[in-house]
Amino acid sequence: MTARPDTLPFDPNAASAVLERVSSQWDRDIVPELIEYVKLPAKSPAFEAEWQRAGQIERAIDQARHFVAAQPVKAMTLEVIRLEGRTPVLFFDIPGTGAKANGKTVVLYGHLDKQPEMTGWREDGGPWTPILEAGKLYGRGSADDGYAVFAALAAVLALDHQGLARPRVIGLIETCEESGSYDLPAYLDALAPRMGDVGLVVALDSGAGNYEQLWATTSLRGLVNGTMTVRMLTEGVHSGDAGGVVASTFRIARQLLDRIDDSLTGMTHSPVFAAEIPQERLAQARQAAEILGETIWKRFPWQSCGGAHEFTLPTSTDPVELILNRTWRASLAVTGADGLPPTHAAGNVLRPYTALKLSLRIPPTVDGATAAAEVKRLVTENTPYQAHVTFEADSAATGWNAPAFAPWLTVALDAASMHYFGKPAAYMGEGGTIPFMGMLGAKFPNAQMLVTGVLGPKSNAHGPNEFLHIDYAKKVTAATAMVIAAA
């Protein structure tokens, strides 16, 4: 549904002024703040066990607190909340204005913790070395998700500067998202009574199919992270002596992985990892496929002599099927390993064990704990050669399927996208996981949920050369402001 000019939920002149105000603040304040933020190795606790001693998460939240405190927002309250033994949360509360002062609450969500370094960064850069080039800011956390707290305040300030009525706004910025948000439920329990009647949640931590329109995320996959360890010996032995007698733990691991997914197609076997795809999500996948076409798969940094068009993909090159594969079907990745020496130091030894870090993305409606139990069952029951196999789950997050969009929200999204991009909003599920959404959906079941973000083609969150597309971020900030005004 695309809003007609006579049904726009806002004045076009005011919307243009909002973008002008937002853009000015991005250039003057936000980009310099993000440059400093990129320099902070504020790795999430899953990747920095001594995060308290390291102090980088503290530095990140302190930077954000100083920025928020410096903004000229009337009657705002601000605090860093610390529950014993947990990562801190930045919480701000801004009263509503005008005719919407006593309406429902809007919650703006983001996070400040980061993924680890990864290898493969450009030679003149690195994860903690910000590079501003061709309208993009390179560096870890720039787009995932350091910009969110700054954009949230810019959106509120732009509305207030134009005198546009808006609801009460709550800011909830956590520092444990990249570890599965395991600290967040305790904070939600503590803070929910202070949030009031939540009518809209905006999470600025998601993807964009392109940089040419506003994208709303309709679903997020769940995630099971854990380590599978296969042991056969108490110590390494000469491979010439034991080879052919003692089974290689790597070979056993290969067999166990085949119990989870098909090594040719990547499709998982167990029905526990499958879910029925709603008809609305199928229709949205078709719409997104019409918009994006082959860019769905050509946008990745393939290693090929002939270019991406030379590839045979594991399942299909049909954009609709690929969208469904990455949003509503399970997929397994091995993201790390122990017990394997680097190649230059590898002797002719039959190693005693192989440990693999497994990352299983599951459909939005599959229960994370159930999926984790199924992974453990598959790899630990009836093991080959009576190998000693364990699976320890680090996290088991259930995904999220958005509630039906209210008509006002659909109209506001399309109107904002048409005004700022000249195209209507687009809707698509994402393959990543934001555990917060399921948590807040359970806490506030009647709230509308807008999940959007700046992670467009090649922005490469979690990988090397992550970047923030600044012009797109400005428009997403302005569009967010107009949706808040329409709430």
Image (cartoon, rainbow, N blue to C red):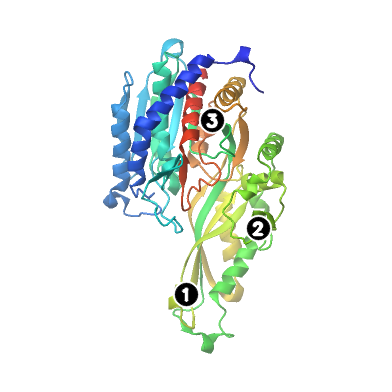
Q: Position of residue 484 (x, y in %)?
A: 48, 22
Marks 1/3: CA–CA distance: 47 Å
Which amino acid does the dot numbered 2 rest on?
Gly
The residue positioned farthest toward the top in the image shown? 99
Point out the frontmost of discs 1 and 3: 1
* Front-most of residues 130 and 156: 130
Crowding at mark 1 (Cα within 10 Å: few <14, some 14-19, many 20+): few
Position of the N terminus by quadrant: top right
Marks 2/1: CA–CA distance: 27 Å
Question: Residue, x 53% and y 34% (percent of image)?
Answer: 451
From the viewer's perspective, tell me whether residue 377 is left or right of residue 231.
right
Of the numbered discs 1 and 3, the one sitting upstream in the chain is 1
Which residue is labeled 1 in the image? 343
Crowding at mark 2 (Cα within 10 Å: few <14, some 14-19, many 20+): some
Local secondary structure at mark 2: loop
Of the numbered discs 3 and 2, the one sitting upstream in the chain is 2
Question: Residue, x 43% and y 50% (percent of image)?
Answer: 115
Instruction: Find residue 68 and report its image quarter.
Output: top left
* Front-most of residues 331 and 3: 3
Of the numbered discs 2 and 1, the one sitting upstream in the chain is 2
Local secondary structure at mark 1: helix
Callouts 2 and 1 close, C-beta under 8 Å: no
The residue positioned farthest toward the bottom in the image shown? 241
Which residue is labeled 3 in the image? 450
Callouts 3 and 2 close, C-beta under 8 Å: no
Which residue is labeled 2 in the image? 266
Callouts 1 and 3 close, C-beta under 8 Å: no
Marks 3/2: CA–CA distance: 31 Å
Which amino acid does the dot numbered 1 rest on?
Thr
Crowding at mark 3 (Cα within 10 Å: few <14, some 14-19, many 20+): many
Instruction: Find residue 35 and report its image quarter.
Output: top left
